[in-house]
Image (tube, rainbow, N blue to C red):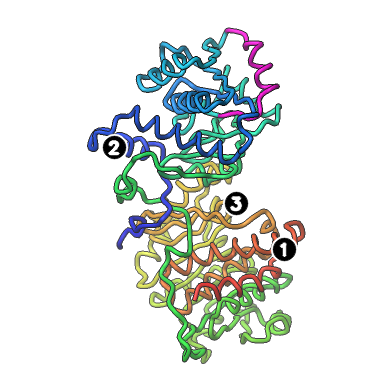
Amino acid sequence: MVNDLGRSGVTRLLTSAQMRAADRRTIEQLGLPGIVLMENAGAAATSILQHRLPDWKSRPVLILAGGGNNGGDGLVMARRLLQAGGRVTVLLLAKSAALPGDARIHHEVFRNSGGSLLEWSGDDAPCPARFSALLAHCGVVVDAIFGTGLTRPVEGRAAIVIQAVIASGKPVLAVDLPSGVCADTGRILGCALPARWTVTFAAEKIGHRLHPGAGLCGERIVVPIGIPDAFLTIPEHDTALNRPEDCPIPPRRPETHKGECGRLLIIAGGPGMEGAAILVARGAARVGAGLITVATPASIQPVVTAGLVEAMTLALSNDHSSAHSLSELRNHRFQPDLVAIGPGLGESEWTAGLVAGVITEKDRPVLLDADALNVLAGQGDRIRQWAGSRRSALVLTPHPGEMARLLGIPVAAVQGDRLGVARSTAQDWGVWLVLKGADTIIAAPDGRAWINATGNAGLASGGSGDLLTGIIAGLWTQGWPTESAVRVGVWMHGAAADNSAASEGMAGLVASDLLPQIRRLRDTLG
């Protein structure tokens, strides 16, 4: 499969190691010195600060500089602000003599320019009283303590400073990444300093888009510093921001008829869970699926039918064996192009039998959600075997609890490394995996992954996952490539929530509120 993350315009998300490698290649292969890259980074961050705060000259600037290259970027900012007529003071949380080469040079240039610097280099030394006064009277704080290089929990003087700035409520501009956020996972390492703006260099890092760290970045601004784009588009850079414009989307021809827009079979619903089946079908309909049949237990079919005007329904005899129900499905005149199964079915032997029967139909794409996943808890070997024997794709859409049950690990382990868990599982099992959450992860069988940035806390309500199942299945059944259906479906679901919240508010948002927005978004995509 071609790695589309190399295409121009794709928003790549790098690890800290990948970013260091790009820096090193720029220095070694192009001959562009590291001190110049540091100057470019500091200059770009300075420009952003000046544009975001037009009255910056009337605001004393306090720059918190660490003992690494991030601190060197901050020292460049300090000199440039000083030379432009600003009032700036640097608090250096390291010994100046121990600064690495490029940062040490910029430290000397700042001092030779008449800059004011306060050094606090010992964990045992008391916090300088002058720091409290500087913080109280400054108008903005620049966070250049750690950047992307942090690998252990924040402690000592850095933790004291971060907590003091948080308590002050002063606006913060973070250089590269808010200090305390892990660049590779978005985890908070001890404590972290929330930013109003985060200026990052050459490319966003994965931690900019993974919660909880993503929620501390404020406005993200990516600026070039001289690293060639070719060094940022190598195949190893296999994580990107999920955007619909990066996906091939089949056009809907004027002469298209319903049979060409896909035949979707939804197997969903149960007593008390009728709404799950209805929402899946409505989501699929609103993205343009041509013909939809909802197979649901006979006891609730009248309720499901009443909630669906456009879709057909099929009663399943769930008081018989799953083999009997599978026979009912096969004998029905409706021959689907794709099957979505799971929402509201309940965890039972009947459901497990249906899921196994559907998956073993090797030529038909299948989407598994909700109870179709729950009945497969701890059966990774079985899923891998099924996926490996199929001629069509298998898509799984678990939330963190379902993911944890599938793998037999704690939910905290899933949430602690969402990207790593999703990517490794998709590769190991040979499936497309959508790990839902505040930063939904889409992972492909070939190791590529995307982080979705649309959506809000309004989606934390019953039925939103069912709607997502319908959206993805509805796009997929129309003949969209698997990647496009999954990625665009996830993006559209979140974007609909964002649009709805913008017009009506976030609190009280329910899944059915998204349907009009979903239709509008679908129509913008062709």
Q: Is residue 138 left or right of residue 245?
A: right
Q: Which residue is mark 1?
A: 503
Pick whichever of labels 3 and 2 is earlier in the sequence.
2
Query: Identity of the amino acid at label 2?
Result: Thr
In the rendered image, the residue lying farthest to the top is 125
Q: Position of residue 377 (x, y in %)?
A: 53, 57
Q: Which residue is mark 3?
A: 438
Query: Which numbered disc covers residue 466?
Result: none
Which element carries disc 3, helix, strand or loop? loop
Query: Identity of the amino acid at label 1?
Result: Ser
Q: Are marks 2 and 1 in contact (CB under 8 Å)?
A: no
Image position of 230 with respect to 392: above or below: above
Which element carries disc 2, helix, strand or loop? helix
Query: Which numbered disc covers residue 26?
Result: 2
Q: Which residues are magenta?
A: 125-142
For the residues labelled 3 and 2, the Cα–Cα distance comes to 35 Å
The verdict on residue 69 being magenta is no
For the residues labelled 3 and 1, the Cα–Cα distance comes to 20 Å
Q: Residue at x 48, y 60 (%)?
A: 243
Q: Residue at x 43, y 23 (%)?
A: 68
Residue 380 in view in this figure: yes
Q: Are marks 3 and 1 in contact (CB under 8 Å)?
A: no
Image position of 299 with respect to 168: above or below: below
Q: Position of residue 133 (x, y in %)?
A: 68, 16
Between 44 and 488, the one nearer to me in the picture: 44
Q: Nearer the viewer, mark 3 or mark 2?
A: 2
For the residues labelled 2 and 1, the Cα–Cα distance comes to 46 Å
Q: Is residue 410 left or right of residue 252?
A: right
